[in-house]
Image (cartoon, grey):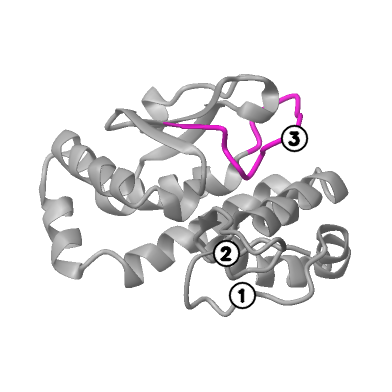
Amino acid sequence: MAPFDGTSAAGGTAARIGPNALLQLDPLLREAGLDRSVYAAAGIEAMPDGTGMIDERPVARVHQELRRIAPGRAPDLAHAAGVGTGRYILAHRIPRAAQRLLRMLPAPLAARLLARAIAANAWTFAGSGRFSVKTPFCFEIADNPVVRGETAPRPVCDWHSGVFTTLYAALVHPDMRCTETACCAAGAPACRFEIARPSRAVTRRP
């Protein structure tokens, strides 16, 4: 089992990701009665304490085993965990004054500033993946560790979509929604996330 402290079994340093990738999912798995089976399959014996970044490998295993064990429930559970992560970021990581300023700005300018802040802290949800801002309303994560080595017929990064939806709905426009339009697991070179209001939203492609 890979430790959560960011060190590998061989003593080296493993790539790390924010602990909310697991902590926000844990109560949802318990409520759904999936925690024991998912954690056993992923080799997880305890949750991280939330005080620092954690090894990305057990995080990926939990998300991937959830999709394998409960494919019908995994999208909603992962998305809800992403919403919880976004709310945690709003409550603890973005100053209230900055949030008020963003809400006062025109949506294009608010999105530009928010995208810049997300890029500056991308390691919290991208881990060792390569994050890039294509436009203020479009992000990509190449070699996304949460789906690394996984294959799927459609985009499966519902946790990330939940995070981005929550942040943009709170700080840019309440109708903003994020859709993953391409995914490494589905054969794309990068996971692509597009944020738009429903009337302009893109349709998820298989």
Q: Measured from the top left, where is residue 101 in percent x and y? A: 11, 56
Residue 41 to residue 148: above or below: below
Q: Measured from the top left, where is residue 54 in percent x and y? A: 56, 65
Q: Which mark is residue 150?
A: 3
Q: Quadrant of the N terminus?
A: bottom right
Residue depicted at x 84% and y 45%: 68
Q: Is residue 192 left or right of residue 8?
A: left
Residue 80 to residue 137: above or below: below
Which of the two discs, 3 and 2, labels the residue nearer the N terminus?
Answer: 2
**What secondary structure is the magenta-colored segment mainly?**
loop
Q: Residues within 10 Å of mark 3 (few under 14, many from 20)?
A: some
Residue 185: name its quadrant. top right
Which amino acid, mark 2?
A: Gly
Which amino acid, mark 3?
A: Glu
Which amino acid, mark 1?
A: Pro
Residue 124: name its quadrant. bottom left
> Which is nearer the eye, 143 or 118?
143
Which residue matches tag 1? 48
- Taking the magenta stretch, the answer to whether it contains residue 63 is no
**Element type at mark 1:** loop
Which of the two discs, 1 and 3, labels the residue nearer the N terminus?
Answer: 1
**Element type at mark 2:** loop
Residue 154 to residue 69: above or below: above
Which residue matches tag 2? 6
Q: Residues within 10 Å of mark 1 (few under 14, many from 20)?
A: some
Q: Is residue 93 left or right of residue 206?
A: left
Q: Quadrant of the C terminus?
A: top right
Q: Is residue 37 left or right of residue 91?
A: right
In the image, the segment drawn in magenta is 140-156
Q: CA distance from mark 1 to mark 3?
A: 24 Å
Residue depicted at x 11% and y 51%: 104
